[in-house]
Image (cartoon, rainbow, N blue to C red):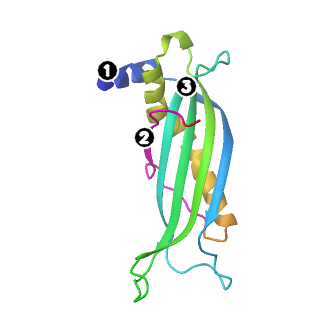
Amino acid sequence: MGRGKIVEEVINKFPNATLDEITMLSCEVETKAKAMATGPRKGPLKFDASARVKGVMAEAEGLPVGMYTHFELEVFQDRKPTKKDSSTKTDLARILVGYASFFSVSPINKDDISEPECDEFALREGFRLIQPYIQQHVSEMTGRLGFPPLLLPSGAIDVEIYEELDS
């Protein structure tokens, strides 16, 4: 079955998906520059954000679809190059977070869902449903690091499907 057909099947099969559970599995924060002791950094924070998702068949009754998400965020500011360093950005922080989430997709039976459909669900619907939680987490984390809270706009995260889950 081609990807276009899978997308059509996902749209038809999952019209009423709801997020039932989201759990943070891991969180790693690496600061690369300190917040300014005299006040907030001048200039806006910028970011590169990406996520990889993998749909899985859940074992729990009534929660047929699960999703693993690996989220990565690089926070930086633009700067002028110097004679010593030609870089045009100052790296401030790197945040890596792993999430597991489970969805109700009634009235679907988990035996009616294929693995490619789970992946497509994770990419299209699952990530859309957990994105507000990621946005809130990023805002809190950047604020706790001493930077202005970073607000990720919807659609600002590049999302792709894991080919295989890391062990």
Snapshot quadrant of residue 59: top right
Along the horizontal axis of the image, is 129 left or right of 36? left
**Label 2, label 1: how many angstroms apart (C-alpha)?**
18 Å
> Which is nearer the eye, 27 or 120?
27
Tag 2 secondary structure: strand
Residue 103 vs 143, above or below: the answer is: above
Give residue 165's position: percent from left, percent from top: 53, 34
Please name the amino acid that badge 3 sits on. Val
Please rate how many residues cluster around mark 1, counting C-alpha atoms within 10 Å: few if below 14, some from 14 to 19, many from 20. Answer: few
- Disc 3 vs disc 1: Cβ atoms closer than 8 Å? no
The quadrant of the picture occupied by the C terminus is: top right
Residue under circle 2?
Answer: 160
Please name the amino acid that badge 1 sits on. Lys
Residue segment shown in magenta: 149-165
Please rate how many residues cluster around mark 2, counting C-alpha atoms within 10 Å: few if below 14, some from 14 to 19, many from 20. Answer: some
Residue under circle 3?
Answer: 56
- Disc 2 vs disc 3: Cβ atoms closer than 8 Å? no
Give residue 112's position: percent from left, percent from top: 49, 11
Give residue 92's position: percent from left, percent from top: 56, 70
Tag 3 secondary structure: strand
Residue 153 on the magenta span: yes
Residue located 62% across and 33% down the image: 101
Residue under circle 1?
Answer: 5
**Label 2, label 3: how many angstroms apart (C-alpha)?**
15 Å
Residue 65 vs 112, above or below: the answer is: below
| Sequence-earlier tag: 2 or 3 | 3
